[in-house]
Image: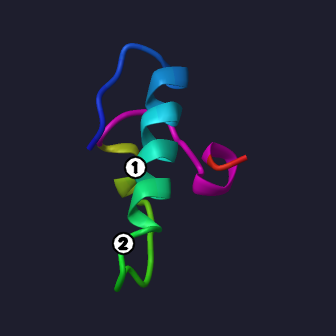
Amino acid sequence: MINGVSKEAISAAMKAGINAACRVPGVLKISAANYEGKLGSHQFPLHVVLE
Protein backbone atom coordinates (compact mmCIF):
# COMPACT_ATOMS: atom_id res chain seq x y z
CA MET A 1 0.00 0.00 0.00
CA ILE A 2 1.35 3.40 -0.97
CA ASN A 3 -0.18 6.70 0.13
CA GLY A 4 0.85 9.96 -1.47
CA VAL A 5 -0.11 13.57 -2.01
CA SER A 6 -0.62 13.17 -5.76
CA LYS A 7 -0.76 10.57 -8.50
CA GLU A 8 2.58 11.86 -9.75
CA ALA A 9 4.21 11.41 -6.34
CA ILE A 10 2.86 7.88 -6.05
CA SER A 11 4.04 6.98 -9.55
CA ALA A 12 7.51 8.36 -8.82
CA ALA A 13 7.70 6.40 -5.55
CA MET A 14 6.60 3.20 -7.26
CA LYS A 15 9.12 3.67 -10.07
CA ALA A 16 11.96 4.27 -7.60
CA GLY A 17 10.99 1.22 -5.55
CA ILE A 18 10.69 -1.04 -8.57
CA ASN A 19 14.02 0.13 -9.97
CA ALA A 20 15.68 -0.46 -6.58
CA ALA A 21 14.15 -3.93 -6.27
CA CYS A 22 15.43 -4.85 -9.74
CA ARG A 23 18.99 -4.40 -8.45
CA VAL A 24 18.51 -6.87 -5.58
CA PRO A 25 19.84 -10.36 -6.33
CA GLY A 26 17.15 -13.01 -6.17
CA VAL A 27 14.14 -10.85 -7.04
CA LEU A 28 12.17 -12.92 -9.54
CA LYS A 29 8.93 -11.00 -10.01
CA ILE A 30 7.31 -7.68 -9.29
CA SER A 31 3.54 -7.44 -9.54
CA ALA A 32 0.62 -5.30 -8.44
CA ALA A 33 -2.99 -5.98 -7.46
CA ASN A 34 -6.10 -3.80 -7.30
CA TYR A 35 -8.22 -6.01 -5.00
CA GLU A 36 -11.29 -5.19 -7.11
CA GLY A 37 -11.03 -1.50 -6.20
CA LYS A 38 -11.55 -2.12 -2.46
CA LEU A 39 -8.42 -0.15 -1.55
CA GLY A 40 -9.21 2.86 -3.71
CA SER A 41 -10.31 3.88 -7.14
CA HIS A 42 -6.91 4.75 -8.60
CA GLN A 43 -4.89 2.26 -10.63
CA PHE A 44 -1.20 2.47 -11.49
CA PRO A 45 -0.35 -0.09 -14.18
CA LEU A 46 3.30 -1.02 -13.77
CA HIS A 47 4.07 -0.71 -17.48
CA VAL A 48 2.78 2.89 -17.37
CA VAL A 49 4.66 3.75 -14.15
CA LEU A 50 7.92 2.53 -15.71
CA GLU A 51 7.57 4.53 -18.96
The percent coordinates of residue 10 (x first, y second) are 44, 30
Q: 14 or 32, which lies in front? A: 14
The question of residue 35 being in magenta is answered with no
47 to the left or right of 21: right
Residue 26's tag is none
Q: Residue 49 placed where, x, y %?
A: 61, 44
**8 or 32: nearer the eye?**
8
Residue 40 lies in the magenta-colored region: yes
Label 2 sits on residue: 24
Q: Secondary structure at mark 1?
A: helix
Left of 51 or right of it: where is 17? Answer: left
- Inspect the image, locate mark 1, and give the three-letter code of the amino acid beneath it: Gly
Residue wearing tag 1: 17
The number of numbered discs placed on residues in the rendered structure image is 2
Which secondary structure class fits the magenta region best?
loop
x then y, percent, for residue 2? 30, 37
Compute the Cα span from label 2 to label 1: 11 Å
Mark 1 Cα within 10 Å, few/some/many (few <14, many 20+)?
few
Q: Residue at x 29, y 28 (%)?
A: 3
Q: Secondary structure at mark 2?
A: loop
Task: Name which of mark 2 and mark 1 comes first in the sequence.
Answer: 1
As drawn, 25 above or below 20? below
Image quarter (top left, top right, bottom left or bottom right) of the N terminus = top left
Residue interval drawn in magenta: 39-49
